[in-house]
Amino acid sequence: MPLLEIKNLHARIDDREILKGIDLVVNPGEVHAIMGPNGSGKSTLASVLAGREDYEVTDGSISFDGKDLLEMEADERAREGLFLAFQYPVELPGVSMPTFLRQSLNAVRAHRGQPELTAAEFLRTMREKAALVELKDDLARRSVNEGFSGGEKKRNEIFQMALLEPKLGVLDETDSGLDIDALRIVSEGVNKLRSPERGFVVITHYQRLLDYIVPDVVHVLVDGRIVKTGGRELALELEDKGYDWIGDPAEASAA
Amino acid sequence: MSTAETEYLSDIADQEYAYGFVTDIDAETLPPGLSEDTVRFISAKKNEPEWLLEWRLAAFRHFMKLLEAGSEAYPQWAHLRYAMPNFQDISYYSAPKQKAQYESLDEVDPKLLETFERLGIPLAEQKRLAGVAFDVVMDSVSVATTFKEELSKVGVVFCSFGEAVQEHPELVRKYLGSVIPHTDNFYAALNSAVFSDGSFVYIPAGVRCPMELSTYFRINERGTGQFERTLIIAEKGAYVSYMEGCTAPQRDENQLHAACVEIYAHEDSEVKYATVQNWYPGDENGVGGVYNFVTKRALAAGDRAKVSWTQLETGSAITWKYPSVILKGDDTVGEFYSVAFTKGKQQADTGTKMIHLGRRSSSTIISKGISGGESQNAYRGLVRIGPRAEGARNFSQCDSLLLTDRCGAHTFPYIEIQNPSGQVEHEATTSKIGEDQMFYCAQRGIPEGEAVKLIVNGFAKEVMAKLPMEFAVEAQKLLAIELEGSVG
Ligand SMILES: Nc1ncnc2c1ncn2[C@@H]1O[C@H](COP(=O)(O)OP(=O)(O)OP(=O)(O)O)[C@@H](O)[C@H]1O
Ligand SMILES: [Mg+2]
């Protein structure tokens, strides 16, 4: 059974259609990369998967681990094991990281029928996962994302993913804003989370990330449609030639 | 048995003795109406000295003048909507209720009990608050006794206002009205004429009060009534931290509450005053809630005196309250930290006044307003730098968080600078609880209600952290409970 199966997905915001018929299948253990020009709808796809209410799904279906994803509220999807690492993580002033993470982790654990962690167990787990992405100790004590640098926010997202151990991780431009060392560290963190059961959708503009997180499949999203799908060499080709050579998306889908 | 314990137990015995005269006491509840006789009656009931009666009468005459002036003299500037109370419809004296309303907790509204439960309020305390008959538990006897003993060892006086009038009349006479004269405002005049009871605190020179003083532990607590009067005096170099109120929901048939709190801080003293206010806000239409019109003021009289007000306001249908500090001495410090949460049809107009008179006096104002439902929540604050206040400084930060589209948040800062060297900094923000923030929490598996609590607690944290430890945990729980159903 596929982990994620998107069929003919159409979504709009206000009166503007942004996703215009997306088909995508991610099997357990696979890493799919999605590339595409600015404004093509990559973050929109991620938001629709995560259940953001601003977007209206007008057609199509999404099944996640055999369940109808569109039937679930955003928080339910998260507890079911869908994790989105945000392109722009928001700040929660005054909400301490441990408070937030403990609530989050316990919500997810309760859903899986696991007992709540004691304070000591939680702190141990937190320390362990923070080490995975070399998150600085003091960040884990501050308010969620407040005053974090761009790179620290991204690192924090992957740290949270490690903590919540989702079935599917959707990474929206996690590489942007990371310096070279951080990119390596964060990628290694993601690689450690790869497993035969877990899938990833990695949204990126740069081939470099895919040197570290080697994808099984690469998709090109242009103007709300997947216009090309290939192996990891497709990413190299895009890096070389840009998106223009793929041609007009309407033509491509007509072809 | 120690003498203090003996004393305490005989106190209890006295109360039981008084209980025997139930009919008499009941008969002494005054019918509604306000006249000079009312004031004389109250003063006589309390066995007050002549000077105090005169003091009350002066206030009474002033109040009647204001009342005759009609709506012109009535405070109307606040951002509040309600009908002016009819002061002849109120009963100004009723003997302390000795008789329990209920025989057991089973008779009490289960919803109220559930709230107590969630706040973690001990059983005996639950009974007291709900008005259930209960035996004096040995536990609380010893707590109260140890408490009194320890305080008297260092010369701290902590008792009811009525007791202080009897036992320390010279102190009461010297300080009563020295910070809030009866002419101060409409409700201060009323309170001065008819005040019921309240607390009295005296910290001698150089003494650091060995524990947090809380109304919660005051032995003679019997429901302080609707016109509470509190007086706190810190002598030179003294320190005290005082906590008023409790997180448990407090019901009261009296709609009008007009309290006065005066703090007199001498040279090098420090007074911290914390309040949790959770009076009945009325039903979903705002009917029956308490009108809470409070005058709270501190005089930082001596050099380097320091006073801070910290408050969590969640209750009452209408709140009108501006805990203030007059920074008279040089290098004095005034602080105001406030969280005001309104929901349903509640209205709050609260803030502070920092009056800088002394050189290099400094003040900090941090106000966090949270509005839910259809409530109206206003911050009103005055910072005045007097002509002599060379080098005075103020920092004000007023943040408002809106939980719905139907509520209102308002900020009215008044700044008067009469000395060019004064520095005043004012920051204000208003934000709607962020959809982005809510979505972020949801994406981490946190349900909506929990997410609101997290975000609001985060918003209020800076102020909540200023509450004494004993209060902070309860206060946070209270805020969480109040938040339920306030969004949407
Ligand atoms: N809330 C919104 N309101 C209006 N338009 C929106 C909204 N969100 C997205 N859009 C529009 O939808 C289109 C797709 O945006 P999206 O963020 O999905 O692009 P993207 O592929 O992630 O781009 P980038 O590579 O720059 O991150 C853009 O034209 C954007 O302006
Ligand atoms: Mg994007």
Image: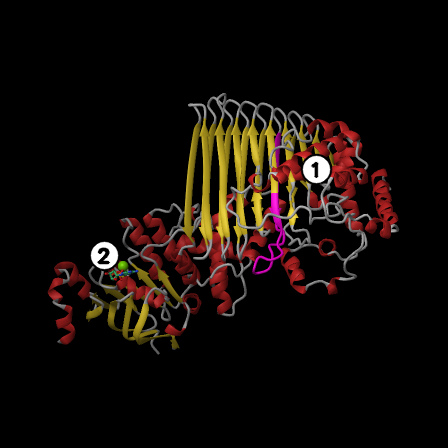
Question: At 66% across and 39% down in the image, what residue appears?
Answer: B190
Q: Ligand 1 sits in which quadrant?
A: bottom left
Residue B160 showing in the rendered view:
no
Question: Any magenta on residue A250?
Answer: no
Which one is closest to the eye, mark 2 or mark 1?
A: 1
Badge 2 and badge 1 both on one subunit: no
Q: Which image quadrant for residue B436?
A: bottom left
Q: Which residues are magenta?
A: B270-293
User: Which residue in the structure is indicated by mark 2?
Assistant: A208
At label 1, the amino acid type is Ala
Question: Residue A113 at x, y = what percent?
Answer: 51, 70
Q: Is residue B146 left or right of residue A24?
A: right
Q: Which image quadrant for residue A197?
A: bottom left
Q: Secondary structure at mark 2?
A: helix
Question: Residue B415 at x, y = what percent?
Answer: 45, 33
- Looking at the image, residue B39 lies above or below residue A17: above
Question: Residue A29 at x, y = what percent?
Answer: 33, 70
At label 2, the amino acid type is Arg
Q: Number of callouts in the render?
A: 2
Q: Which mark is residue B193?
A: 1
Q: Is residue B330 left or right of residue A138?
A: right
Question: Residue B163 at x, y = what percent?
Answer: 78, 37
Q: Is residue A128 left or right of residue B307?
A: left
Q: Label 2 crowding class (10 Å Cα cut-off): few <14, some 14-19, many 20+? A: some
**Which residue is more in the foreground, A106 or B315?**
B315
Tell me the chain of label 1.
B
Q: Label 1 crowding class (10 Å Cα cut-off): few <14, some 14-19, many 20+? A: many
